[in-house]
Image (cartoon, grey):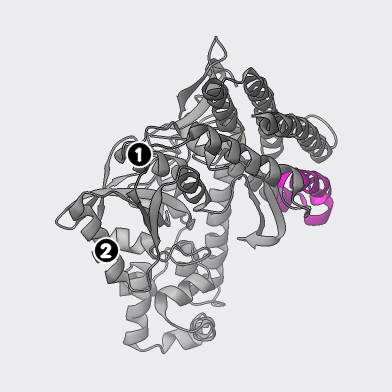
């Protein structure tokens, strides 16, 4: 079990091939921390906010940074995709797959939306039933051939198109320190320097500015839905809480030990405080959905809180960026 | 977040499983703690679930009032939109929009109706007789009920 599906799947695939890395380590090396707020892209009429990079990014970055040889395949033909999977299972090679969750029969029903970026591993097969290792489930789950096929070719936004990925070969040794440094540098760059106001820290500022205007612009009901969507993404299954900030703090702490850098542990503590602020934002937003807020301008308050988060996060990443250059 | 602060607010939204949160222990070391839910997070999810139900109820009313055909209702009940329904059925968006018209729907050949019953996973009888009472998507589609707290 793990907090985030792509981390979890990547960690499990590596473990099978003898590389033992924790989930926070995978997350950090794979530069899994991010922020984007894209008011111009809407899903079900609500702007997209995300605390992670595009699906597939973590697996790709981690394996590249550790020098691991991987295969990533997409399919036009449904039957071919299942035949290829069966061949791998026969050889005893676990295969990661991107799936939609709506038709995932064992998944918690309250989470079965038409969401197409979940990751699972097929570890075995018996007649028409596949055995699935799903990072959010506590044990191996059975899944029927038709259901697996349906989830692999789920329709709608970001179609998985049967996407399957697995490890061909792992090197005899790898340099974890270099991989950690690369992972941190990438995240600092993503958070601090993308020159568009929708990504990284600039994205948080834009969100803060927009939140303030939501009640007048959209009306109370829709403003609540917009705000609810931000909290859902922040606390989505697999974030480990606070939009991955705690998971990242756990990574920095572990990295501090490996690299023998006490400064990284200081940054980990700062990141934990940032995470606590995101939780505070969640609580304040929660009071708005439940009409339990006390102040007169609750949306101004959450907007202020977001700006505070942005400032604290900025300090943390600027410090981290300085430290990582010396490592 | 400290270990003991990891929320344990259970409304059965995870259907019995727990998810992992990362929190610090007494020595300041990160550790994994399981959590069945957190109030603000649950509220946000329930808000999204209620929105789906509202959209379905609105569609149901439109069918009852004779403004739309049952295809429109079942599309929403199965949390589809025109794009998904187009891809699932193989019909053009233009044709599906026509099938939303009660007059057109009445005259649809069996071949077309069969396609819709397959895509929605329902019987022909269900397709022609939409539920008489409001439905909750989670209960109808997955026989799932949430636990009520407070």
- Front position in the image: B143 or B10: B10
Q: Residue at x 33, y 47 (%)?
A: A106
Task: From the image, give the main secondary structure of the stretch colored magenta.
Answer: helix
Residue A178 on image: x %, y %: 55, 36
- The quadrant the C terminus of chain A occupies is top right
Instruction: Name the disc covering residue A226, or none.
Output: none
Residue A114 on image: x %, y %: 48, 58
Q: Residues within 10 Å of mark 1 (few under 14, many from 20)?
A: few
Q: Residue at x 55, y 10 (%)?
A: B27
The reply to whether the magenta stretch includes residue B69 is no
Label whose residue precedes the other's in the sequence (1 or 2): 2
Q: Residues within 10 Å of mark 2 (few under 14, many from 20)?
A: some
Does any portion of residue B108 appear in the rendered image? yes
Q: Which residue is mark 2?
A: A84
| CA distance for labels 1 and 2 | 27 Å
Residue B74 shown left or right of residue B53 in the figure: left
Q: Secondary structure at mark 1?
A: loop
Q: Which residue, as the protein is rendered here, is positioned at the far left? A: A127
* Chain of the residue where label 1 is placed in the rendered structure: A
Does any portion of residue B9 appear in the rendered image? no
Q: Which residue is mark 1?
A: A172
Q: Which residues are magenta?
A: A200-224
- Front position in the image: B109 or A181: A181
> Is label 1 or label 2 in front?
1
């Amino acid at each position: 079990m793990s907090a985030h599906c792509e981390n979890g799947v990547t960690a499990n695939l590596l473990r099978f091939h003898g590389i033992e890395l924790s989930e926070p380590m995978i997350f950090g090396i794979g530069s899994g921390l991010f922020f984007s707020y894209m008011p111009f892209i809407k899903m079900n009429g609500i702007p997209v906010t995300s605390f992670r990079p595009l699906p597939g990014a973590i697996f790709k970055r981690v394996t590249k940074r550790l020098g691991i040889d991987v295969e990533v395949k997409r399919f036009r033909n449904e039957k071919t995709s299942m035949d290829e999977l069966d061949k791998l299972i026969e050889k005893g090679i676990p295969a990661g797959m991107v799936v939609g969750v709506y038709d995932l029969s064992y998944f918690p029903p309250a989470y079965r939306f038409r969401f197409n970026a979940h990751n699972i591993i097929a570890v075995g097969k018996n007649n028409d039933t596949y055995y699935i290792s799903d990072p959010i489930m506590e044990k191996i789950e059975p899944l029927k051939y038709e259901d697996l096929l349906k989830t692999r070719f789920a329709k709608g936004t970001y179609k998985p198109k049967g996407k399957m990925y697995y490890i061909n070969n792992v090197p005899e040794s790898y340099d974890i320190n270099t991989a950690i440094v690369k992972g941190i540098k990438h995240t600092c760059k993503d958070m601090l320097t993308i020159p568009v106001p929708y990504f990284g820290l600039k994205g948080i500022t834009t969100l803060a500015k927009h939140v303030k205007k939501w009640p007048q612009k959209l009306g109370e009901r829709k403003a609540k839905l917009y705000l609810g969507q931000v909290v859902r993404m922040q606390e989505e299954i697999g974030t480990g809480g606070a939009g991955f900030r705690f998971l990242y703090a756990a990574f920095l702490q572990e990295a501090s030990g490996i690299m023998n850098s006490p400064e990284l542990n200081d940054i980990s503590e700062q990141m934990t405080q940032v995470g606590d602020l995101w939780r505070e934002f969640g609580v304040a937003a929660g009071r708005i959905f439940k009409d339990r807020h006390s102040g007169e301008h609750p949306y101004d308050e959450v907007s202020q809180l977001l700006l505070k988060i942005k400032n604290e996060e900025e300090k943390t990443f600027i410090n981290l960026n300085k430290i990582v250059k010396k490592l | 977040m400290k270990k003991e602060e990891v929320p344990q607010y259970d409304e059965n939204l995870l259907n019995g499983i727990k998810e992992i949160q990362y929190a610090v222990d007494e020595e300041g070391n990160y550790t994994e703690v399981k959590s069945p839910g957190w109030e603000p997070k649950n509220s946000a999810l329930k808000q999204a679930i209620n929105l789906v139900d509202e959209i379905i109820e609105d569609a149901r009313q439109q069918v009852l009032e004779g403004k739309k055909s049952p295809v429109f209702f079942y599309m929403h009940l199965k949390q589809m939109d025109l794009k998904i329904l187009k891809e699932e059925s193989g019909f053009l968006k233009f044709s599906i929009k026509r099938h939303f018209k009660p007059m057109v729907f009445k005259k649809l050949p069996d071949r077309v109706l069969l396609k819709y019953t397959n895509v929605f996973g329902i019987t022909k009888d269900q397709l022609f007789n939409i539920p008489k009472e409001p439905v909750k998507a989670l209960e109808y589609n997955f026989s799932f009920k949430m636990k009520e707290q407070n």
